[in-house]
Amino acid sequence: MGPCLIAADSNEHTADSTKQPLPFCVLCAVCCVLITMVRIPRGMYEAIIQHCRSRYPKEACGILAGDERHVVQVYPMRNVEDSPVGYSMDPKEQLLVEKQMRSKGQRMIGIFHSHTATEAYPSPVDVRLAISPEISYVLVSLKQPTIPAIKSYRIDGAAITEEPVTVE
Ligand SMILES: [Zn+2]
């Protein structure tokens, strides 16, 4: 985990990338864990893996809806690139999911996609296309198809920070 970017005097526990990293943050023990951990219920974890396996050897993608850092719903999405080395979502499908999330009081907390031949680590293209440091980029590697690896990252410009994933 990188240096804490949260101002110790901030009432809002919001990471602010424009602030300089503090040498020491009294809130670290609480806020960093709360903000950066992604919690995925077991059934939803299985749904993510299943969607990724169903598209293998092509990449699969989807949206994670949640409440704080807790995943409450998985929206498997179509990879319009239909490729083993890249993905992009259909903007129309994305809009539809956004509407569904809004009607359920959910918000997008993450985007997941699979890597079928490489590690669960953001590729240079993943980094370039990352839209917000507020979103968790969940990577599923099926490099070893029987042992899927799942990892999550925050991407802020060129900075990649891994965050813990808990399947519960
Ligand atoms: Zn990727």
Image: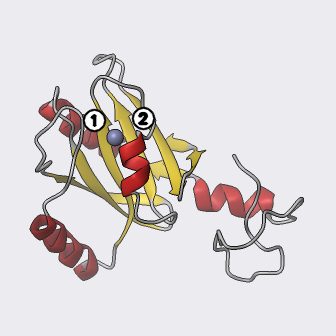
Q: Is residue 54 left or right of residue 110?
A: left
Disc with the residue nearer the chain's start (2 vs 1): 1
Q: Secondary structure at mark 1?
A: helix
Residue 111 at least partly seen: yes
Q: Residue 94's x, y, as percent?
A: 18, 67
Q: Which mark is residue 49?
A: 1
- Which residue is denoted by mark 2 in the rendering? 150
Q: Is 147 located above or below residue 113 in the figure?
A: above
User: Quadrant location of residue 31?
Assistant: bottom right
Q: Is 46 located above or below residue 161 in the figure?
A: above
Q: Which mark is residue 17?
A: none
Mark 2 to mark 1 CA distance (whole Å): 9 Å
Q: Is 101 located above or below residue 128 in the figure?
A: below
Q: Residue 61's x, y, as percent?
A: 24, 47
Asked if the residue at label 2 sits under 8 Å from ligand 1, the reply is: no
User: Quadrant location of residue 114?
Assistant: top left
Residue found 69% across the figure and 58% down from its top = 32
Query: Label 2 sits on what residue type?
Result: Ile
Q: Residue 147's x, y, as percent?
A: 36, 19
Query: Label 1 sits on what residue type?
Result: Ile
